[in-house]
Amino acid sequence: MIKIIITTLVFVVTVMGANADVVDDPWAPSYLSYLFHLYYDNGQLFADRDFEFKYDIIAEEFIPETLTTQFPFRGEIVDLKNRVAAEFTFDPRRGNPDFLKGKISVKAPYAPDGQKAVFYDSQGRTLLTIFVSESSFCNDDGVCNSDRGEDYLTCSNDCKETPTTNDQRPTTGGGGQGGMLVAAIYVLIIAGAALGGWFGWKWWKGRRELPTIPPTPPMS
């Protein structure tokens, strides 16, 4: 039992250290994606009316779609300075030539200063524009607004990276070495409680297994 507890503790601390970058900022822009709710109709694209919001932000790293068509549609994420922040391609038919109309979902890379998503057909004609600025916390105004969540990772246009020394990473809100220390303390407390409980159980079991000595008869 002791070996199991110690092994588990070492494993947890090792994994936490190996994944420190993910723990520091799990909501970094590179780990987010747009998910657009669309309707395809014979080469045209529309926002799906059954959804209150035309898109969602999902905690999922964007992975380009595997295409099986030679004539894919494409899209652009345009930032607040009217620059193309990201591009993506997709097939609204998902490789099915018999699909002529219906609901589709399209993923795109997230841009913290995104203004709009523009969708084009295979000929480069603009089909649909969806504005996404309401989900952008980087406003590209030249001021690093930390209260909005801007930092050098999420809004490099407004915030510059803080110089560090001794190869230390800059501190990020809600994570970093402080978060790792708190997590390690919790692990130690849990492991100590489990170890104490095990010793208590062994002591109680030993008390129950003590041999019963019959009383000595009184001297006559």
Image (cartoon, helix red, strand yellow):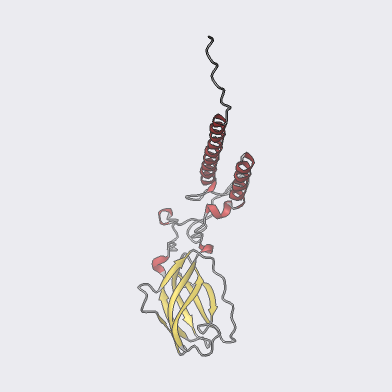
Residue 41 in view here: yes
Q: Position of residue 166 (x, y in %)?
A: 62, 44
Give the answer, above or below, for where 68 lies relative to 157. Answer: below
Q: What residue sits 43% from the left and 53% below the top?
A: 146
Is the N terminus in the top left, top right, bottom left or bottom right quadrant?
Answer: top right
> In the image shown, does 31 or 160 lie closer to the viewer?
31
Give the answer, above or below, for where 92 lies relative to 15. Answer: below
Residue located farthest toward the top when viewing the structure as drawn: 220
Q: Residue 149's quadrant in the figure?
A: bottom left
Residue located farthest toward the front when viewing the structure as drawn: 220
Q: Position of residue 183 (x, y in %)?
A: 52, 45
Q: What residue sits 45% from the left and 60% below the top?
A: 142
Q: Is residue 180 left or right of residue 103?
A: right
> In the image shown, does 33 or 126 lie closer to the viewer?
33
Give the answer, above or below, for where 53 lies relative to 126. Answer: above
Disc count in the image? 0
> In the image shown, does 108 or 85 lie closer to the viewer?
108
Q: Position of residue 177 (x, y in %)?
A: 54, 45
Q: Position of residue 144 (x, y in %)?
A: 45, 56
Give the answer, above or below, for where 170 lies relative to 56. Answer: above
Residue 44 in view here: no
Q: What residue sits 47% from the left and 70% below the top?
A: 34
